[in-house]
């Protein structure tokens, strides 16, 4: 999956194999992981300006097609989002040592919201939004186990989440500016 909806100041290429000649700058995400190269997402990134190209090696979360993998442009044009088997890494291409990993392991879906400019990450129970200045909001629990984003209408995200007490999907609504929500399949 490649989604470059947002304007970006970098060029990136997903590699099918680790290059035989490695660039001078290489970064591994996360830094402390054993055997990161095994089925990792390898990306050659060329930032804007004077900073040289670098190899980003992103550790694979889970194998298979049930979780996302790919690259997304971020609301901040200098940042890139790389997702490897549901593990989402947000990397500042100007300074690749500056990065964050989305707390959901795995991320089950990435939704691009052009206005307000957000990447919305879904986990099994809640949503997290990333904007041009970093994390914008995170919802409370919306589901007992598994949620699905169904649409975005204006400043509202709609989705469904499973409710254990009724054993059915219930609709929820999330305000994209604040993360406030109502509905859903999780009752305390």
Image (cartoon, rainbow, N blue to C red):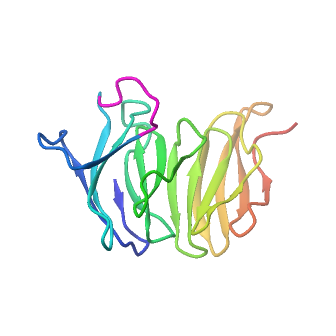
In the rendered image of this protein, does residue 108 appear above or below residue 135?
Answer: above
- The residue sitting at the left extreme is 20
Number of labelled discs? 0
Query: Bounds of the magenta span?
Result: 29-37
x, y percent for residue 81: 44, 55
x, y percent for residue 153: 62, 71
Residue plotted at (36% across, 32% down): 64
Q: Quadrant of the C terminus?
A: top right
x, y percent for residue 175: 73, 66
Left or right: 17 as drawn, with respect to 54: left
Residue 143, quarter of the rendered image: top right
Residue plotted at (51% across, 48% down): 109
- The residue sitting at the top extreme is 34
In the rendered image of this protein, does residue 124 appear above or below residue 74?
Answer: above
Q: Main secondary structure of the magenta part?
A: loop
Residue plotted at (68% across, 44% down): 161
As rendered, which of 159 and 109 lies closer to the eye? 109
x, y percent for residue 137: 71, 58
In the rendered image of this protein, does residue 93 appear above or below residue 185?
Answer: below
In magenta stretch: residue 44:
no
In magenta stretch: residue 30:
yes
- The residue sitting at the right extreme is 188
Residue plotted at (46% across, 39% down): 86
As rendered, which of 42 and 49 lies closer to the eye? 49
Left or right: 44 as drawn, with respect to 79: left
């Amino acid at each position: 999956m490649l989604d470059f909806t947002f304007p970006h100041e970098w060029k990136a290429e997903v590699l099918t194999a680790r290059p035989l000649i490695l660039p001078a700058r290489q970064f591994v995400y996360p830094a402390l992981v054993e055997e990161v190269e095994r089925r990792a997402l390898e990306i050659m990134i060329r930032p804007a300006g004077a900073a040289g190209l670098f190899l980003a090696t992103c550790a694979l979360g889970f194998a298979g097609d049930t979780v996302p993998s790919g690259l997304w442009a971020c609301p901040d044009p200098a940042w890139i989002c790389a997702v490897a088997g549901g593990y989402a890494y947000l990397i500042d291409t100007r300074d690749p040592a500056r990065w964050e990993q989305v707390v959901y392991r795995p991320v089950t879906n990435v939704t691009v919201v052009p206005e307000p400019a957000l990447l919305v990450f879904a986990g099994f129970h809640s949503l997290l939004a990333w904007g041009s200045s970093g994390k914008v909001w995170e919802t409370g629990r919306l589901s007992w186990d598994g949620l699905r984003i169904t649409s975005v209408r204006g400043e509202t995200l709609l989705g469904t989440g499973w409710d254990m007490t009724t054993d059915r999907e219930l609709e929820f609504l999330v305000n994209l500016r604040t993360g406030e929500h109502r509905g859903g399949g999780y009752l305390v």
